[in-house]
Image (tube, rainbow, N blue to C red):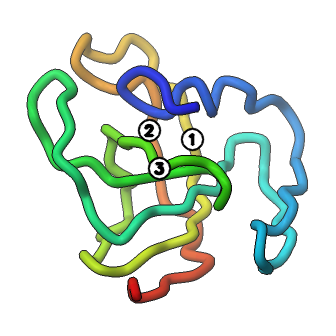
Amino acid sequence: MLAGMTMAGCLDQIGPGAVTVPPPEGGGEQIELAANEQRLFIGPERRTCQGFIEQQCLQVRESLSDPWGNFYSEIEGLVPVNGVSYEVIVEVTEIPNPPADASSRRYQLVEIVTSVPAE
């Protein structure tokens, strides 16, 4: 489900109005999200990935049943600790005319829902 340099394929469907996101498989709570917000699950380690240049990418998925995918952007306000998994809410903002080697979206931390040390 992850596409391009970011999660563009996942986030293209964000539209006007708030949405209710069901709890993740295995528990949790329903979360009310604004139209420009996204729930993301972040894995406990970065992995080497190749975008415009080789870099260390967060491992991200939108639900617990999705496969992990490379997240080439950063999430402003989040300093992930190696060995800790996160469930976060981010605000997604479109960037008009981004550089060719940059994301067309800005991701900013709204809330850390959970943070759990990896087992």
- Tell me what residue is drawn at x 43 percent, y 43 percent: 69
Looking at this view, is 15 or 66 the one in front?
66
Going from N to C along the chain, the mark reached first, 3 or 1, is: 3
Looking at this view, is 59 or 40 the one in front?
59
Mark 3 lies on residue: 68
Mark 1 lies on residue: 92
Looking at this view, is 7 or 107 the one in front?
7
Q: Position of residue 11 (x, y in %)?
A: 63, 32
| Residue 116 falls left or right of residue 62 | left
Secondary structure type for disc 2: strand
Label 1 near label 2: C-beta < 8 Å? yes
The 10 Å Cα crowd at callout 1, few under 14, some 14 to 19, many 20 or more, is some
Number of the label disc, if any, that sits on residue 66 = none
Badge count: 3
Looking at this view, is 91 or 4 the one in front?
4
Type of residue at label 1?
Val
Number of the label disc, if any, that sits on residue 106 = 2
Q: Quadrant of the N terminus?
A: top right
Which numbered disc, 3 or 1, marks the residue closer to the eye? 3
Type of residue at label 3?
Trp
Q: Quadrant of the C terminus?
A: bottom left
Going from N to C along the chain, the mark reached first, 2 or 1, is: 1
- Tell me what residue is drawn at x 49 percent, y 83 percent: 115
